[in-house]
Amino acid sequence: AVNATDGLVESGDIVKLISKDNLTFIVNADVVRVSGLLGEQLNEITKKGTKELEIDIESHILEICIQYMHYKVIYRNVRG
């Protein structure tokens, strides 16, 4: 089977992003690291041994942010 993300991400680590209204998003850690702020927070929680990050953002906005970060990962090597 071909994985749509083959070669796009460096690690298989996943993170749970929990929105302000308690919706959970399961996201690849490399996608989260596209954001400087979320990447720093991810590094801090990883040191503590957890993979859950509570975000003070409503779920409908967080979902759009995740979509944008995922888009950036997909197209980061495309020259235009």
Image: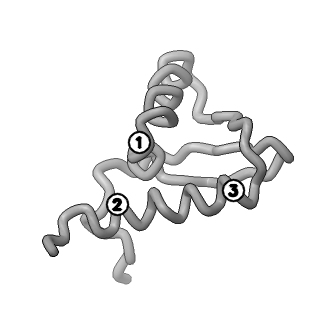
Residue 35 at x, y percent in the picture: 44, 43
Q: CA distance from mark 3 to mark 2?
A: 19 Å
**What amino acid type should be assigned to the residue bearing mark 2?**
Val
Q: Please name the amino acid that badge 1 sits on.
A: Arg
Q: Is residue 63 above or below residue 23?
A: below
User: To which residue does mark 3 refer?
Assistant: 61
Element at label 3: helix
> Which residue appears farthest toward the right when viewing the image?
21
Query: Is disc 3 in contact with disc 2, using a CB cutoff of under 8 Å?
Result: no
Seen from this angle, which residue lies furthest bottom?
1
Compare marks 3 and 2 and give the one earlier in the sequence. Answer: 3
Q: CA distance from mark 2 to mark 1?
A: 10 Å
Q: Residues within 10 Å of mark 2 (few under 14, many from 20)?
A: some
Q: Which residue is more in the foreground, 70 or 61?
A: 61
Tell me whether the residue at label 3 lies in contact with that at label 1, contact meaning CB atoms closer than 8 angstroms.
Answer: no
| Picture residue at 48% right of the left edge, 62% below the top | 68
Quarter holding the N terminus? bottom left
Mark 3–mark 1 Cα distance, whole angstroms, equals: 17 Å
Query: What residue is shown with label 2?
Result: 73
The x and y percentages for residue 57 are: 72, 43
27 lies above or below 64: above
Q: Nearer the viewer, mark 3 or mark 1?
A: 3
Q: Horizontal placement of 21 versus 62: left or right?
A: right
For mark 2, give the secondary structure: helix
Q: Quadrant of residue 74?
A: bottom left
Query: Looking at the picture, how far across and down is residue 16, in whole percent?
Result: 64, 44
Q: In the image, residue 23 lies at what x, y percent?
A: 80, 52
Badge 2 or badge 1: first in the primary sequence: 1
Q: Secondary structure at mark 1?
A: loop
Q: Which residue is mark 1?
A: 33
Image check: 30 left or right of 79? right
